[in-house]
Image (tube, rainbow, N blue to C red):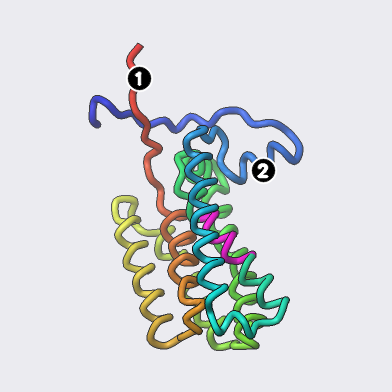
Amino acid sequence: MRADLRVRWEIPPTGTGLAGRLERFMGPGKSRSESAVEALGLLGCALILAAGLWTSDTARGWSTAQLVVVALTGLDLIGGVLTNATNAAKRWYHRAGPGVRRSRLLFVSAHLVHLAAMGLIVLSGDVAWTLANAALLLGGAVVVEFAPLHLGRPVAMALLMAAVLVNLFWLPVPAALAWFAPLFFLKLLVCHLVPEAPLERRRDG
């Protein structure tokens, strides 16, 4: 370990009720700098996504329901990538304790709703796209979760690239949705499932 760095796995106490549940969902003990990066990153990337959709001929032909699904999905994936990459989320979702692995896999499985909404509403009932991506997600999640600890990151990266390539060549979508697969699998297979040490600068004294 470098002398100027330390790993901090201690999880600060959280409150009760809705506020406490939300804090645990986002990762307890998030620093102000982490929150700032999340907010600025979400704002910046959301504006880029909105600008891209605004200039897309495909997006102009979408119904209100399709636009709502795309907007909510985009915001969730952008925010999810940033949130799951923070030290606070790593500490919480990779803490020691019974049921933690199950909770990670349930979190991933909940995103089948995203695939259903995109495939059945935005892609007008593309069942093959939905089922293929569901298989890529669930199969990849199990492989990453049960991979040896020291191989988790490269295994997740390999599966991310494989999923993106499969989508590009065999599960094509309009250019206005080309961002979906990279962000979707990045959020879940890499940012959420890969355990990483929550590093911070060591402060003397």
Q: What range of the chain is rendered magenta?
A: 72-80
| Three-letter residue code for mark 2 | Leu
> What is the total number of numbered labels drawn onto the structure image?
2
Query: At 60% from the left edge and 87% from the top edge, which residue is drawn?
Result: 127
Query: At 34% from the left edge and 63% from the top edge, which residue is drawn?
Result: 157
Q: Position of residue 66 (x, y in %)?
A: 67, 77
Quadrant placement of the C terminus: top left
Q: Which residue bears the numbered disc 1?
A: 203
Query: At 64% from the left edge and 70% from the top edge, which residue is drawn?
Result: 113
Magenta-colored segment: predominant secondary structure: helix
Depth check: give the residue in front, 195 or 165: 165
Q: Residue furthest left?
A: 2
Q: Position of residue 32 (x, y in %)?
A: 52, 33
Q: Is 169 contained in the magenta span?
A: no
Q: Is residue 72 left or right of residue 98?
A: right
Depth check: give the residue in front, 93 or 98: 93
Q: Is residue 81 above or below residue 66?
A: above
Task: Give the class, few, some or many, for how many residues have Cα within 10 Å of label 2's Cα (few <14, many ≥20).
Answer: some
